[in-house]
Amino acid sequence: MKVTHILERTTETSQFSGLSIGSVIASAAALLFLVAPDIGLPLRIFMIAIVLLSLRFSGGVLVLVAVQADLFFREPKRGDAFSGLVGLLTVFLILCLLMFINRNRNLLQRAAKRPIIAFFATIGAVFRGEMTFDSGKAVREISRLIGAAIRGGAILMGVIFVSRILLSTLPTPQTFNQNLREWITNEAFIPGCSLLLGSIVALWIVCNEIAWRQMTRDQARIYLRSVLLLSHHADFRMIVRGRLKSRRKVVRERKDADATPGQLNEKNFAGQNL
Amino acid sequence: MTALARWLALPAIAGLFLGILRQQTGLSLLSLSVLVWLLAEWLYFTWRVWFELRQLKFERSVNGRTESSGILWAGRQVSVEVRLTTSLIGIGANVQIRDVVPENLSVLDQDNDVTIRSRIHTAVFQYRGRVLGAGQLRLPGFHIVLTDRQGFFRAARFIPLVQNFRVLPAYQNTSDAQPMVKRINSLPQHGIHRLQRSGMGSELLELREYAPGDPPKSIAWKVSARRDKLMTRQYESEVPVRLQLFVDGSIGTRTGGYGMRLIDQMNFVAASVAKAATSAGDPVGAMLFDERGLRRIPSGTGDRGFHRLLEALSDFSANPAPVPDRMSNQLLEAAMTVAAEQFPELLDSRVNHIPFLLFPVSPWAHRRLRERYRLAAVLAQLYHLSPVKQLQLVYDDPLMATFAQHFLSQSGMSWMEPVVSVRNRGFHDGMARMEILSNALSRAVTQARDNEVFVILADLLECVPSLSHLMPAIKMALARHHRVAIVCPSPTFLRPTAESTEIRSLTAEGLLLAAEQTRTRELAARLQYELRRSGAAVAISGEDNAIQLVLSQMSIARTGRVAAGGVQ
């Protein structure tokens, strides 16, 4: 039996919003502390503060950039630290953190808009018991959060496995020249490549066709309009400007005629004896 | 794809490239995972847009009714319930749904904006609102914004579900309704003839056959015995007073937003006095005039007459076709906002292409021109314009202003500021208005059957210099023993008393209010001086005292007494 849900307002905040914001900041700070341990502590704190303050704008982008920079400078070439399960787990955790930050970005933005005094007032209200805690809503929210976390985790695990497989198929700089030479000399690759190219083109056409068919009637009409306008833009613009110019000329002439009411217009008296 | 996803993809691509180049497995794996993650989210999001969003169905009931049209009352609360159903698979989280409401409906607590936070199959949401002004109320449909949980992708759609309502003006039930008995037993003036009609007065009007429902005490027993059938005495009613309303609907009275327009004040006074009059059994008619001309509503009595008048006032209060005036950025932005709300899919850059533009060089002007191109395409699509006309909308300001204003009016927005007659044009507008009003009043006087009360509800404050055009008609009405009451709505909703001109706060709003009130007071003093000399009664602002003024004039007309016109 289908249950009819009562939808919540968009402005309705979660009861765990404070906890979520705290968790995001703490976990991001913890990860960033692990990054670049060679840099001096004041500089690290400064950089962490900048990244944390920009979380509400950039989401997890700066955190990703920080981690990538750390890997770029510290990870040894041809190292196998990330080849095993630990490496996969590390990437999984970093992606989890990015997901966590991005999912709570709206909360961070909303919290940043409020003055700090309001934050303390909320904490005070909680301790004074003025804010009621809806346990039923909390249970619903917890179950929702757990479900979302499990789904997100599953997606990320799948993503990492796919990435690992893709990465293993990509050529390295050492093997690239060798592979290229083999590929050029070996004629057996040609049908495969042709098939691959054909498949990509076919997929592209199918995707475009589906996208086209998903358009509404009005969208399709406006698309055709804009395509027609693009192709004849110069001509249409010339027509429109010509019309506007002639209209302005008529208005100007009328104004001039109105401005001299005392003068006789000979055209009106054509054929009459003045 | 949102900016966040683009910014995330950029370092991921760079990291993948560098990682492969430098053979750093960790960097490559992390960067590639981010890209694959984005791809996976895009696939899921696309599936949701194509399949889930299309299955959404809505049903809206306003005050418990789901019909596509109905009647609402200005100033009263409206409860709206929206029921949402989907297919078997349901719809997932992060779908923001907003029932788009026109300017005429003020929603309490933003309850019309809800979000789906978990997968559902059927759902419901309710909200309450208050209707602000008489006219039309059109609920066009639902604005849907679908995002993924991370905010990487966003799609906006509009699902139409149109319901049109006629909004009748608010009225006040006056506590001291006119008594049905004569208060003063005096002879009327010469030239005043009472209109005889049936009622429960003291004078016998006629005898007629008994009809079921007649009060038993009105049965004429002796006559019934003589004629061998029941006869009923029909008594003469008290002298009915014909109330004739003159309502001004010029552009100046339609600006300022619903509920704050001058015409809303006038509607309130007109409906309240009409209610009081019809309750007392008096016929009420109206003459509605604006730039389009004059419309006469024949006199009517009882509830039917009252409702007919309210419907006429409601239709009259709906914004008419706009007058082309001048284009402004504000008008363009308002039209763009409404278009983005109601037609988001038509503004999508994938279908609404813009030609390459080198000029203007300024980025702000360039952005504005691009927006204008997009808006022109939407308007051309809505109003079935040719491509040349579509391009003309971009370069022709008056044409764009006309269509944008028309579009806003149809979308339930009130008049925009640029089409308001500017004050230096007020003199000519005022003369034209006085001319129409004068003709209407003269016509009403010539058609008057009895001593009538003419109530002029017009924005005369801006037309004080042109008042001489109206004075002959007012004097003629007064000379024929009719009563004339004039109600001028105040732009600040306050009576221009000495106290109201005091500066209440030193904020910009407070100072502006005081300045506007001082100006209104000066204009009101001039207007009152002119009208007081002729013997007409004047009330400034559409408050209770204006209603009382009209009722007192009716009372005077009913008794046939002579009373000097006063200033309230």
Image (cartoon, grey):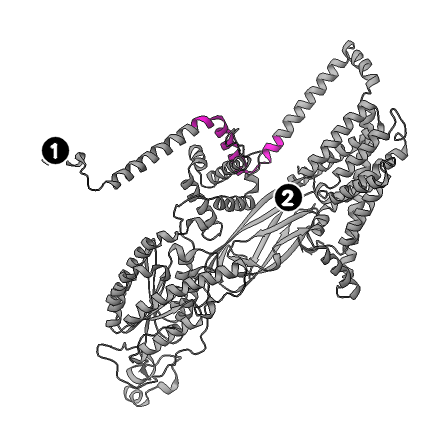
Residue at x-position 39% and y-position 61%: B312
Residue B259 shows in the view: no
**In the rendered image, the vertical position of residue A107 relative to residue B301, given as above or below:** above
Q: Residue most toward the top?
A: A185
**Residue B392 in the image, given as x and y percentages of width and height:** 42, 35
Residue type marked 1: Gly
Q: Quadrant of the N terminus of chain A?
A: bottom right
Q: Position of residue A265 (x, y in %)?
A: 19, 36
Most frequent secondary structure within the magenta stretch: helix
**Same chain assignment for discs 2 and 1:** no
Q: Give the left or right position of residue A203, taking residue B561 as reference.
A: right
> Quick check: B341 left or right of B409?
right
Which contiguous range is marked in magenta? A209-235
Circle 1 marks a residue in which chain?
A: A
Which circle marks residue A237 in the picture?
A: none
Q: Which of the two marks, 2 or 1, is nearer to us in this view? A: 1
Q: Is label 2 in a helix, a strand or a loop? A: helix
Q: Nearer the viewer, residue B462 or A151?
A: B462
Of the pair B501 and A193, the residue shown nearer to us: B501
Name the residue located 72 percent from the left edge and 31 percent from the top edge. Answer: B10
Q: Residues within 10 Å of mark 1 (few under 14, many from 20)?
A: few
x and y, in percent, of residue A203 in the image: 67, 26
Disc 2 and disc 1: Cα gap in Å? 75 Å
Residue designated by label 1: A271
Mark 2: few/some/many CA within 10 Å (<14, 14-19, 20+): many
Q: Is residue B90 above or below residue A233?
A: below
The residue wearing badge 2 is B53
